Image: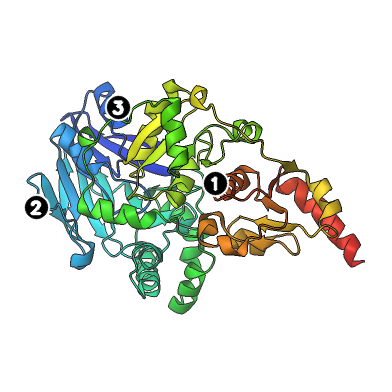
């Protein structure tokens, strides 16, 4: 048996290839939309992709399962668990096989067995893997978004992103029983999860790529609860904000994503087109670095720097999937890769892109302030300190008097931000605050200043000043 691991840091997402060298067959588990990586890996190993599967209807990226099956002629194995609301709408296609709890199939000499693991979603499956040449028991499990390193999948996504009222508690109780069932499996079982640290599909995912069930039994908080109510309270508490685009991903993946070959290639546009897009108030994402935007930001464009691994999450917070968008890319050479990355979260309606040389209108530098300067001015000058970190980050540590509006909710709460006072935007490192500053400036705020220091500086400087004022 051959096992290959793929990891996309932009999505904090893992997918896998299981191959049987003897038969030349391969299975891909939880592929994303950039399928070339799987095709190249199979070719390098002398394998044919004959089977494709996924653990559940994903909420955080566009599944590549349908794309990959269409490109290779592979059979596509999809969950048939739960009710009609959470079944695949393209299950009637001729290459689809629906799978239920206990079903199994062979990839050469490798047996794949489906295990029903509801909780994160109602239709979720895990897959036990047995190399039958030398064993009659499974070596490991693909656990998708049920079980991570150090965490389990959150159960509130359907309620938050898909308007499924009351599903959070129901999912948490399902997750409790799923964990209890996995406690009965042997400790040696290797665990291959669908996400790593940085994913919004849980609240405390580990950063190492795999684990063992025995280790999780000892140290994963989810395995320490014997009381169902206590487990539910723990699991629902402190979950991060659900990115706005998750609901769109659920709908797209349930319906069946459009094949990439059917999408138009966004054209490179000129300076006149950029001026027209700005004049029309179109949504323009500036993918250049924070430093470039800070030096010469383009009013009307939102800076979400593509050199940060998490940029797709923030694009997903603000993009309107029903309207066209435009991109400012760092260079023409970078455009194809960035467009492909954006399409992994379903941003398909891209009307074109601009390179930096097309920016001919007035650019404006983003003013900055250090933590030391802010500490001197904050108590005396009537500034508003706007903390755009998540709620749990804010509750863990924040500057006294700061107003907390998590970045993803900023455009919904513009009426809470004054236009007649200086607003200093802060986060943990400066990445989110730059996005926030550019977003506010695109709405016409001209009173925005960015806190340039990270948490290691501002937590010391501002805490010291606060203590002096209190004293």
Q: For the residues carrying marks 3 and 1, which lies nearer the camera in this image? A: 1
305 lies left or right of 74: right
Q: Position of residue 57 (x, y in %)?
A: 28, 54
x 18%, y 66%: residue: 84
Splitting the image into 4 quarters, where does residue 265 fall? top left
Q: Residue furthest right?
A: 471
Pointer 2 residue: 92
Name the secondary structure under disc 2. Answer: loop
Identify the residue under disc 1.
Answer: 442
Q: Residues within 10 Å of mark 1 (few under 14, many from 20)?
A: many
Q: In terms of image quadrants, where is residue 51? A: top left
Q: How many marks?
A: 3
466 or 451, which is in the foreground? Answer: 451
The residue identified by callout 3 is 41
The tag earlier along the polypeptide, 3 or 2, is 3
Most foreground residue, 201 or 2: 201
């Amino acid at each position: 048996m051959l096992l290959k691991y793929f990891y996309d840091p932009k999505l904090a997402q893992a997918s896998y290839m299981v191959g049987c060298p003897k038969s030349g067959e391969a299975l891909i588990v939880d592929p994303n939309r950039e399928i070339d990586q799987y095709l190249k890996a199979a070719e390098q190993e002398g394998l044919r992709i004959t089977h494709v599967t996924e653990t559940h209807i994903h909420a955080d990226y566009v599944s590549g399962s349908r794309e990959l099956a269409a490109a290779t002629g592979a059979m596509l194995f999809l969950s048939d668990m739960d009710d009609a609301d959470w079944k695949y709408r393209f299950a009637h296609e001729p290459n689809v096989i629906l799978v239920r709890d206990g079903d199994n199939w062979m990839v050469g000499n490798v047996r794949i067995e489906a295990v029903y693991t509801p909780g994160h979603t109602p239709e979720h499956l895990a897959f036990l893997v047995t190399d039958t040449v030398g064993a009659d028991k499974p070596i490991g499990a693909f656990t998708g978004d049920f079980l991570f390193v150090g965490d389990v999948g959150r159960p509130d996504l359907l309620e938050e992103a898909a308007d499924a009222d009351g599903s959070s508690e129901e999912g948490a109780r399902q997750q409790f029983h799923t964990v209890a069932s996995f406690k009965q499996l042997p400790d040696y079982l290797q665990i291959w999860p669908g996400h790593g640290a940085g994913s919004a599909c849980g609240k405390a995912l580990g950063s190492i790529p795999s684990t063992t069930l025995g280790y999780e039994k000892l140290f994963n908080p989810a395995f320490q609860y014997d009381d169902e109510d206590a487990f539910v309270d723990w699991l629902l508490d402190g979950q991060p904000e659900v990115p706005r685009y998750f609901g769109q991903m659920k709908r797209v993946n349930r319906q069946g994503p459009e094949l990439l070959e059917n999408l138009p290639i966004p054209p490179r546009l000129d300076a006149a087109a950029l001026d027209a897009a700005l004049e029309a108030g179109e949504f323009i994402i500036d993918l250049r670095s924070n430093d470039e935007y800070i030096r010469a930001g383009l009013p009307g464009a939102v800076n979400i720097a593509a050199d940060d691994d998490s940029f797709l999450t923030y694009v997903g917070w603000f993009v309107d999937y029903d309207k066209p968008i435009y991109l400012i890319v760092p260079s023409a050479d970078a455009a194809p890769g960035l467009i492909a990355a954006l399409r992994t979260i379903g941003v398909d309606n891209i009307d074109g892109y601009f390179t930096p040389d097309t920016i001919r209108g007035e650019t404006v530098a983003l003013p900055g302030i250090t933590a030391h300067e802010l500490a001197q001015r904050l108590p005396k000058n009537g500034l508003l300190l706007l903390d755009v970190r998540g709620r749990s980050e804010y509750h863990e540590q924040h500057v006294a008097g700061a107003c907390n509006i998590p970045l993803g909710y900023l455009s919904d709460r513009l009426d809470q931000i004054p236009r007649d006072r200086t607003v200093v935007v802060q986060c943990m490192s400066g990445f989110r605050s730059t996005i926030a500053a550019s977003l506010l400036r695109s709405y016409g705020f001209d009173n925005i200043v960015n806190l340039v220091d990270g948490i290691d500086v501002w937590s010391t400087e501002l805490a010291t000043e606060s203590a002096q004022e209190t004293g």
